Amino acid sequence: MVKNLVIVESPAKAKTIEGFLGKDFTVKSSFGHIRDLSKKNLSVDINNGFLPHYEVTPDKIKVIKELKKLANEAELVWLASDEDREGEAISWHLIETLKLNKDKIRRIVFHEITRVAITGAIEHPRGIDMNLVDAQQARRVLDRLVGFELSPILWKKIKPALSAGRVQSVAVRLIVDREDEIKNFSPVSSYRVAGRFELKTGQGVAGLDAELQEKFESKEQAIAFLNKCMTARFTVEDVETKPVTKSPAPPFTTSTLTQEASRKLGFSVANTMRIAQQLYEAGKITYMRTDSVNLSTLALAMARDVITKTYGIPYVKTRQYVTRTKGAQEAHEAIRPTYLENQVIQGDVSQKKLYDLIWKRTIASQMSDALVEKTNVTISVSNTREQFIARGEVIKFDGFLKVYFESSDEDNGESQEGMLPPVEPGQPLTRVQIQAIQKFTQPPPRYSEASLVKKLEELGIGRPSTYAPILSTIQKREYVEKSDIPGTVRDYDHITLKNNSITEETKTEKTGYSKGKLIPTDVGIVVNHYLLQNFNNILDYNFTASVEKDFDEIAHGRQVWNKMIRDFYGSFHKQVETALSSPEKAKGEKLLGVDSHTGKNVYVKLGKFGPIVQLGETNNTVKPRFAALKKEQSIEKITLEEALDMFKLPRHLGEYMESEVIVALGKFGPYIKHQNAFYSLPRQDDPLTITKERAIQIIEEKNQKEKEKIIREFAEDDRIKVLKGRWGPYISMEKNNYKIPKGKDPLKLTLSDCLAIVKNTKPSKSKRKRKKT
């Protein structure tokens, strides 16, 4: 008999909580949401107040059965899902699905999984907050309506199997807009002048590096200035020293944690959230989905004690930060360690790294300001008005810098300021060398996952619980990909004045290189442009942010959720009907030019199975030729020459074993065809240049691998084979695979054994996940 049943969202959390409660409590997990809208149909009753129709997800039927049995036996059922909209909805769905008696329900919430927090929650239960449930339902229903009505338009107007989402489409727009900015950016060059000087000090001769305040627009101006410097005297004109105070960054929110973990640890947003969830469920940190920078009174006291004991009283400065994020919602704390006295924890390497980051940020936020002395030395040039400036800084009191310093996306190492030698006004300087280096303005940087989250937060789009799913969705749908851009090499001028002579060099640098940034795919660009043309309001940043505010209003009980949906749906549905009735299709088609041999136009566009090039017009007399783009090619960047190369395929390489060897380009990329068998071309091989010898090598390697897979064959029936697989031996028959029962030796299977297994066993489903488009 169960006295108290506690239901949480995850097994890890259940295990941690179970350690804090006595034998009268049984803790079980719902494994997240137990029911949702059906995947097969709309599941929203548009004519009846947009009422959602939920169904238990197939993988939760067994969980529901167990929970229902335990709930019926229990005196009290404690619903302990997270205190946010999703968590509140999970508790409500549990009540509805398990048909729980309201008298035996207790809803409890906590921001950290500690003994004090759990026992405190048990002492102060509350009811279900239907405002939070309604806010979650409003988001779910609105997103379902948008996705369900927009997706068929994309199938009809662009290509099958596409899908659209309200927030995800806006995120794609940000990335496409940024790519357009980069494409249209024209760099402007200028000449930055930097000098190396020497001066006499009590310890001998010291060096002093300084930079000219002004930049020159042309090479001629830079050289003219260096010519002046050849005969000029250089003097310290002014030494300005001023104290500067540096304050620590506030404790982490979801957004700032994902940004800093990306910069300092190289973690993706999804990875950061996964590790943070593990730390939370193990009782190591507070709730990880929050937009609050607030710390509890208990946390402030813990921080003060730790800093006093570790660093001393001068390092203590208690602060309470104010949340300024647009539309900040639930009254959570910032992300912090549950026990600040624990500087290190047990766990895997990633958990330790992320915990260390959170601990340092939390402790630093409650430490004294750093006191820095900044020094600017102005150097005059006797025969011109331009001046050099040398900058340096000295840390007089390190304060919070003893523990932590926040990084930024713009950190590039160029602005580091070190110590300067002692100098006085009027002191003469000796010129060592002066250099004028050509510099180019830079285009805006592509978004990383972390900087995209930052931008979404700035615009008021999405919430802490939605950032990781947004990024995951746009990449799974292949609208955006995370990849490296190799960049290009360009020349720049490097002019040096040394030993009373000026030398000029042309040097090279790599520009446009980026690693692990978000780049729109051809499909993403075409879908984005189509949606902007036909559903501009849905992709409007202000509109998307205002919808988030509506959800917040619903969560606070100031707006009725289905009225908000009704106000949106009327005009949206009319746009859908207009788009469906239009004959216009979106293929992102571009005319690249004319093939000089045939005189036919060459186009690039989006086809049914992805980007293609087309030679000739579509008409009733002569069909055009088509070729699929290679993975590294795109509609935006392919040239006419590259497109025409595509029509050099298929190539006949000659004969091998009395059969033709052909290399061609198919739906899934380049391949070799030989004796009616197909062999995928490895990424490093180019179908346009591959030799017959290399093709034969690929064929033989693949055939050898196939032979090594065979455990048994049967002369009486060549349809049946016993093969080695990635997950163990199996039987193959007519393109179906069958699992071999335990206890059966694959080497001893007879033909009749195999046929019996095939007859009595269902074919195995492929474990390889298909990519969604």
Image (cartoon, rainbow, N blue to C red):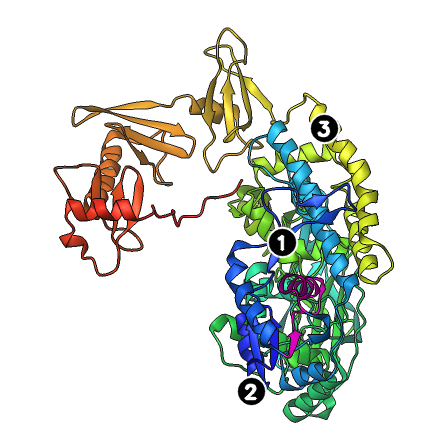
- The residue tagged 3 is 579
Residue type at mark 1: give it.
Asp
Residue toward you, 607 or 52: 52
Q: Which residues are magenta?
A: 75-100
The Cα atoms of the two marked residues, 2 and 3, are separated by 61 Å
Residue at (80% x, 53% y) in the render: 561
- Total marks placed: 3
What residue appears at the point 31 percent right and 55 percent down from the top-left corner?
727
Q: Are marks 2 and 3 in contact (CB under 8 Å)?
A: no
Label placed on residue 36: 1
Q: Which residue is mark 2?
A: 23
SS class, disc 3: helix
Quadrant of the image occupied by residue 110: bottom right
**Quarter in which the N terminus is drawn:** bottom right
Q: Secondary structure at mark 2?
A: loop
Element class at badge 1: strand
Percent of width and height locating residue 201? 66, 78
* Image quadrant assignment for residue 248: bottom right
